[in-house]
Amino acid sequence: MIPRHLMIGVGVLLVAVLGVGIYAGRMRGRAAQVAPAAADTRPVAPPVSGPTERVTLYVAHDDSGTLRTQAASIPLPSARQQRAEEVLRALLEIYLSKNSPHPLASGADVHAVYLVTPGLAVIDLNSAFANGHRSGVLEEELTVASLIQTLAANIPDILRVKILVDGRERETLAGHAGLSGFYDVSAVGQVVGQMQ
Amino acid sequence: MVSLGLPRRSFAGSSALRYSAGLILVVFILIFATSPAGSAGEKRIAVYSGAIAYSLPVVDRDGREYVGLFEILEPLGTVTSRTDGIHWKARYNDADAEFTAGKNRAKVRGQELDLAANFLLESGRGLVPVASLSALVARILGISVTFNEPAHRLFIGNVATHFTAQLSHTTPPRLVMNFSSPVNPTISTEPGKLHMVFNREPIVAPGSPTLTFGDKTISSATYAESSGTAEIVVNGSVSLMASFSNEGRTITVAPAPQPTVAQPLPPSQPSASSAATSVSPSSAPSTVQPSAVQHFYAVVDASHGGDDRGALLSTQLAEKDVSLALARRLRQELQARGITTLVLRDPDTNLTLDQRAEVTNTVHPLIYISMHAASDGRGVRLYTALLPSSGENNGPFAAWDTAQSGFLPVSQAAAQGVASELQKKQIQVRTLAAPLRPLNNVTAAAIAVEVAPPGSDVMDLTLPIYQQNVVSAVADGIAAVRSRLGTPQ
């Protein structure tokens, strides 16, 4: 003979288990209905402070396959490395805008620019930049030339540029423009002359 | 790769000794991590684990082979060591090992272990006999270890890469080698042989070291291993070349493309006069012996291919397909003008950029033409190499990244010649320098041709009449400048 109080206790426990099960099932259903959040591409770095300065950007235009200069006024910090990063971010802002003349993939960004030895700059792009880049000789060359020429035009004494993706060397940007070597700024300048 | 961090030492010891040992370790790692195969003739031992593969030098002492135990263990985990007189103690994670210089008995994880020869202590560096590595490393790591002592190859855990080789009796035959893990061997060729040397991959021997295929063109393959490397040699009666696919898991060996016998140059060609005074394919006799060394005037490279689709021109149209169609048409047009032509990627196979340049430079053509296709823009864009800033030629050795430098003027002349012919056909054309590999690696005139649709519809790229119009202009342009490109070697 099972004591009455034990039967009641077991019954209460069964009801509680059932209730928790139903509650958990509902919670799971709600969670499944919530669409997965898209990759958050918002910047996490604080806004740059510094006096507003005028910079020259070399902006690629896909419709004509050319690079055109465009002046912009942006706040620039005093440190040379941060200045280089901000200049490139100003360029990317144009490429990521709604009516971009040379659209880049959403989330494309420059991790950092390193001015490592006299005359050498290393641009570290993020993977969204490279993986989402359109493939084509001219499209990729416009991007590379635009980045290098913009950097060289605004940060003095840069002679060579190396481009990395997520801190690693990559063979090409999107199947065409080589990234395994060092770009000679003067040679890129000649190409930019052809593209204007 | 090998971690460059200094080991943490938990034992007491003089700071000078620790500093020196750390310095020695860093130097060792820097030297050996950057030269996995070692110099020719140097005895090395290769170690393969799931996460890393590395090789270390083997030293001879009193007729026996020794290797540094610290260097063996350091890339695999946290290891510390301490020298106390003639005693040398090492700790790998939670395992302790104790050795005594001049003694062949060690204590590992509290249990005694007999070594094949005496333990040696040299400047704080503990050397153990190679013959005892299997038992010693297995005891320290606590996992199974396989050691191929004659070949100096140590496999930690179940890391072996197996392979199969099967001959496809097509025309020409192809040897398809499938590997259980991606591989990236160093490949070299000589007449009738193709060598694949595996420095980092834990390749293990097939059932028989010699595989015979009963085919005259590709007759056999042999497997050999020594001093920490494995080598597969494919033997045949013709020159062979290898291509990679399936993300490095498949290597296909096939006969290197053979040239089409040169046709005499039609008398109406503008370069007929120059051909009369120079030894070019166009003036070569049409009865070229198949066994004789043959040369191509032009190498046409259908860009991308295999897993690499190139640009997606539309939802159904990949760049690799258009570039191959253009390359085939260009070969026809060039050969119709008496220009012997090799198409690098005739089937839909993977070829790396380096392989494309290697094959081209081996063939010694006078011009290399890389075919591309694009959906943006109109007409044709011609590219010559934008050379990187690095690379200096050293005597007769040209830097790989700037191998094109001496040929840039003829490349630009070729591009101008082609541009001129395209303009005559009312095809919009633009000439640029571009950082487009492998143009910079080619030791011949080298241009790239990027074909965009004639109008707004990208599918017009596939129109036979448009493709034919473009490639005939390209062929005309090359024929027009052939006398400026020299003669094939």
Image (cartoon, grey):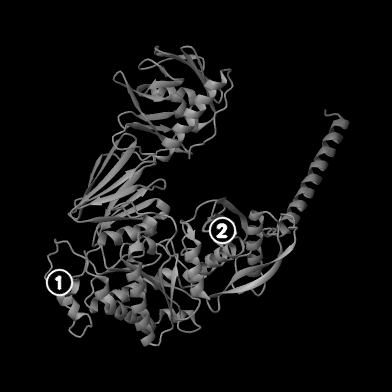
Q: On the rendered structure, is B449 left or right of B12? A: left
Expressed as whole percent of the image width and height from the top left, the position of residue B388 reads 44, 60
| Element on which disc 1 rests | loop
Which amino acid does the dot numbered 1 rest on?
Answer: Ala
> Going 38% across and 80% down the picture, which residue do you hit?
B419
| Circles 2 and 1: CB atoms closer than 8 Å | no
Residue nearest the viewer, comparing A182 with B81? A182
Of badges 2 and 1, nearer the viewer stands 2
Q: Position of residue B328 (x, y in %)?
A: 31, 73
Label 2 Cα neighbours within 10 Å, binned few <14 / some 14-19 / many ≥20: few
Task: Name the one closer to the observer, A15 or B358.
Answer: B358
Q: Which residue is mark 2?
A: A157
B221, B296: nearer the viewer: B296
Give the residue displayed 51% in from the left and 62% down from the top. Answer: A185
Label ID, residue B395: none
Does B95 sit left or right of B345 as displayed?
right
Relative to B411, say whether A16 is above or below: above
Question: Badge 1 sits on which subunit?
Answer: B
Report which residue position mark 1 lands on.
B284
Q: Amino acid at mark 2?
A: Asp
Q: Position of residue A46 (x, y in %)?
A: 74, 55
Which residue is more in the foreground, B390 or B193?
B390
- Which image quadrant for residue A86? bottom right
Q: Residue at x 28, y 56 (%)?
A: B241
Question: From what the image shows, is residue A164 above or below residue B260?
Answer: above
Secondary structure under badge 2? loop
Q: Is residue B378 left or right of residue A93?
A: left
Residue B121 seen from this side: yes
Distance Cα–Cα, label 2 vs label 1:
54 Å
Vertical position of residue A15 compared to residue B361: above or below: above
**Residue lying at 36% horizontally and 55% vertically, measured from the top left:** B400
Label 1 CA crowd tier, 10 Å (few <14, some 14–19, many 20+): some
